[in-house]
Amino acid sequence: MNELFAKYGGMILTFAIWAAVFYFLLILPNKKKQKKHQEMLDSLKEGAEVVTNGGIKGTISSIGPEFLTIRVDKGVNIQVLKNSISRVLK
């Protein structure tokens, strides 16, 4: 067993360190960003002014389970996916 660890222990330790670095630098920040975005989506209300990922700015007129209706001008409403909302302005 000691012989096996002596032969491959350094390689296993190096792999474990790289896995930890990968997790803390890439995966964990992305999870935090996704959680923050989901909290923003859950807090959306009618009347909120939002911007989509495509740059369309409008006011939420109705909210469904998957889609939102956004009023972009008088008499002009569009439906977009909830996940396409990038930020809330007001």
Image: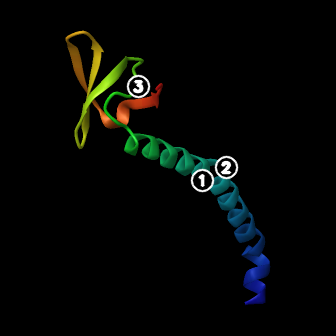
Q: Which residue is mark 1?
A: 28
Residue 68: % across, % down: 26, 32
Helix, strand or loop at label 1? It is helix
Determine crowd level at label 1: few under 14, some 14-19, many 20+ residues with C-alpha closer than 10 A: few
Image quarter hosting the N terminus: bottom right
Q: Which label lies toward us, 1 or 3? A: 3
Q: Which residue is mark 3?
A: 50
Residue 83: % across, % down: 36, 37
Which residue is more in the foreground, 21 or 11?
Answer: 21
> How far apart are the alpha carbons under marks 1 and 2?
7 Å
Determine crowd level at label 2: few under 14, some 14-19, many 20+ residues with C-alpha closer than 10 A: few
User: Of marks 3 and 2, which one's residue comes earlier in the chain?
Assistant: 2
Helix, strand or loop at label 2? It is helix
- At 51% from the left and 45% from the top, the residue drawn is 36
Which residue is more in the foreground, 82 or 6?
Answer: 82
| Residue 23 sits above or below residue 6 on the image | above
